[in-house]
Image: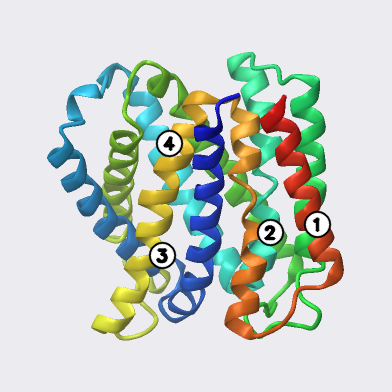
Amino acid sequence: MTFLPLLAAIGASFGWASGIVLAEAPAKQLGAFAFTRIQLITCALIVALLVSTLGYWPTVDWSFWPAFVSSSLFGIVLGNLAMIACLRRGGPRRTELLLSMKAPMVGGMAYMWLNEIPTTADLIGASVALCGVCLAIFFGNSSPSKSDTQTGKLSITILLGLLATTLQGYGFLAMKPALQAGLEPLAATAIRLIGAAVLISLLAIWPVDAMRAQSPLTFSLVGRTILPGFIGYVVSSSLLLYAFTQLNAGIAAVFGSLSPVLILPILWWKDRQRPHSYATLGALLTVLGTAVIALA
């Protein structure tokens, strides 16, 4: 198995782990819709400029347009609205736990739609890694973290998280045939973001309070909103799309779901709270599962 796609997926996980910590405060200030709209529009402009500069537009086969539309609508707009709503209610650690369920969901969808059958070693490694992820997230800190508070009903947080991970997983999987046909991952990211930016701009016309920013926009607030969006939408998404092109979709999703482990040292540094010993064990199990897949 090639190590570069594995490293790309792990890099995507690290990007999302750092991005979701950076996103928590501005997301709570702006609200899910306004936060997502600002991120999508600005990141779409940035990545479109990058793709134009690098000359990747000719790699786009527009016969895959139904996949592009569904990936933008479900994977980015609806998936990320659900994720931000989950983040605002449950904090970054609970959100990452729920998003880690992307791996089995994508694996199941890949089996049904693309007839991808993982090897025994892949299944063993993925299972060990997911057990490690769950340990890491359930026992993330030795004491409650100020960045990890739960507001509202936990059942709503769980439903939002599972909805987000299902929609996001589908959004990545829908792009795989086009990527295998030669579409550059960065161009795929541009298509998804531009489509999502158009869709969310149309939704913003709907005159309801939920669509409006809940805090006055300042340069600082907009900047703190754009940064995690660039890390997640542009860098991490492109890395994971590349991994999806080269690997079995379920395995790529496992490596793209390591954020709950990678977020622990970030929260430790941010909140000065040491991870629980079980979280350390979870991280070791995740590394072991990763090694099983990588060496298979």
Q: Earlier in the sequence, mark 1 or mark 2?
A: 2
Bin the neighbour count of mark 3 within 10 Å (Cα to Cα): few under 14, some 14-19, many 20 and up.
many
- Real-space CA distance between mark 1 and mark 2, rounded to the nearest whole angstrom: 8 Å
Mark 1–mark 2 CB contact (< 8 Å): yes
The amino acid on which the numbered mark 1 sits, given as a three-letter code, is: Gly
* Residue under label 4: 71
Q: Which mark is residue 282?
A: 1
The amino acid on which the numbered mark 2 sits, given as a three-letter code, is: Val
The amino acid on which the numbered mark 3 sits, given as a three-letter code, is: Pro
Camera-near label (3 vs 2) is 2
Q: Earlier in the sequence, mark 4 or mark 1?
A: 4
Mark 3–mark 2 CB contact (< 8 Å): no
272 to 103, vertically: above or below: below
Instruction: Say which residue appears at 58% left-offset and 81% top-offset.
Output: 270
- Real-space CA distance between mark 3 and mark 2, rounded to the nearest whole angstrom: 18 Å
Q: Earlier in the sequence, mark 3 or mark 2?
A: 3
Bin the neighbour count of mark 2 within 10 Å (Cα to Cα): few under 14, some 14-19, many 20 and up.
many
Q: Which mark is residue 261?
A: 2
* Residue under label 3: 228
- Real-space CA distance between mark 4 and mark 2, rounded to the nearest whole angstrom: 27 Å
